[in-house]
C-alpha cells in the first residue's frame, strides 16, 4: 500500500486523497475513522494514485532561468539575457530578447512573472476588443491571476480572469480562453447553449479545447 500522511479532522465526514506536486500522498479523514477503514480506502484508490503520479512524473521540468535560456511567449520564444546594471530590478523585452536585471535567481523569477502578468493584461485587452463584438458582450473588468488549476474564469459581476501562464501557450489557445470566458457573459454554465455560443464565435473551438487539455502542463516556468 502507498505511504501517506494522515490528517484527521472533526469537521470532516468523508475520506479524501491529495497528491502534491512531488507525488507525496495525503489522506484526509474524519477524526473518528478507524485505521482499518482508512487503509482499506487507500488500497481501493491505488490505480488513481498511480495514474496521478505518472501524470506528475511526465510534466515538464521548470525552465532553468539562466543567461541564454529560451522562454516561450505565445507563438515565439525569447532569449533571456541577465545582467545587473545598478538600476532598479526589472524585466523588459528588446525584440527577441528578454532582459532581466535582478539581484538573484529568486528575484529574477519574480520579475519575469511580473512582466508576463503585464503582458497578459495588455494582450488580454487586445483580444477582448477583438472577440467582444463577435460575442455581443464585453466584461466590466479584466483581472490577471495565477491559478494552478484554472486558465480563466468569469464572475457574476462581469469580471473576467485570465491566467498569466497563457502567455506561455500558443496564441490560439489564449484566444480560446478569452472567447470561452466572454461567452460565459451570455451563458454562465457549460450547457448546450454555452457551447452553441462558442461554436458561433469560434467554430474550431473544440480543437483548441483539446489542445489546452492535452498540453496545459507544458505552460509553466
Image (cartoon, rainbow, N blue to C red):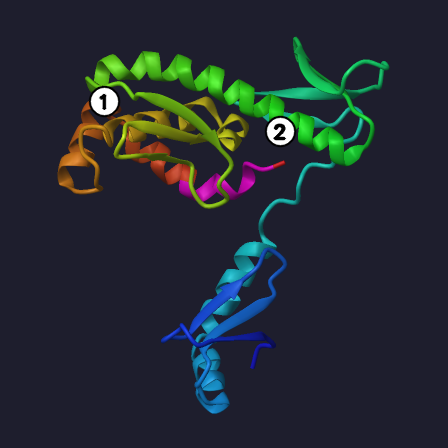
Residue at figure coordinates x 46%, y 72% from the top left? 47
Q: CA distance from mark 1 to mark 2?
A: 31 Å
Which SS type dominates the magenta stretch? Answer: helix
20 sits to left or right of 177: right
Q: Quadrant of the C terminus?
A: top right
Residue 6, given in percent of the width and then of the height, sits at 55, 76
Residue at figure coordinates x 36%, y 76% from the top left? 13
26 sits to left or right of 136: right
Residue at figure coordinates x 43%, y 81% from the top left? 41
Q: Which residue is mark 2?
A: 113
Which residue is the extreme one toward the front?
10
User: Residue 216: within the magenta?
Assistant: yes
128 sits to left or right of 101: left
Q: Which residue is mark 1?
A: 201
**Magenta region: which residues?**
213-220
Q: Quadrant of the N terminus?
A: bottom right
Amino acid at each position: 500500500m502507498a505511504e501517506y500522511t494522515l490528517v484527521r479532522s472533526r469537521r470532516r465526514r468523508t475520506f479524501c486523497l491529495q497528491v502534491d506536486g512531488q507525488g507525496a500522498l495525503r489522506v484526509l479523514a474524519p477524526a473518528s475513522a478507524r485505521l482499518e477503514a482508512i487503509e482499506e480506502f487507500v488500497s481501493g484508490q491505488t490505480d488513481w494514485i498511480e495514474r496521478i503520479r505518472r501524470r506528475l512524473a511526465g510534466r515538464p521540468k521548470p525552465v532553468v532561468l539562466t543567461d541564454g535560456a529560451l522562454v516561450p511567449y505565445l507563438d515565439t520564444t525569447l532569449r533571456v539575457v541577465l545582467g545587473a546594471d545598478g538600476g532598479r530590478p526589472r524585466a523588459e523585452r528588446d525584440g527577441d530578447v528578454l532582459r532581466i536585471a535582478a539581484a538573484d535567481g529568486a528575484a529574477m523569477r519574480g520579475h519575469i512573472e511580473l512582466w508576463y502578468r503585464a503582458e497578459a493584461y495588455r494582450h488580454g485587452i487586445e483580444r477582448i476588443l477583438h472577440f467582444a463584438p463577435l460575442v455581443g458582450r464585453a466584461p466590466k473588468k479584466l483581472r490577471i491571476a495565477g491559478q494552478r488549476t484554472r486558465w480563466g474564469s468569469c464572475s457574476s459581476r462581469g469580471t473576467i480572469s485570465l491566467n498569466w501562464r497563457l502567455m506561455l501557450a500558443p496564441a490560439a489557445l489564449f484566444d480560446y480562453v478569452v472567447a470561452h470566458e466572454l461567452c460565459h457573459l451570455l451563458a454562465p454554465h457549460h450547457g448546450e447553449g454555452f457551447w452553441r455560443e462558442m461554436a458561433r464565435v469560434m467554430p474550431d473551438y473544440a480543437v483548441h479545447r483539446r489542445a489546452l487539455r492535452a498540453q496545459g502542463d507544458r505552460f509553466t516556468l
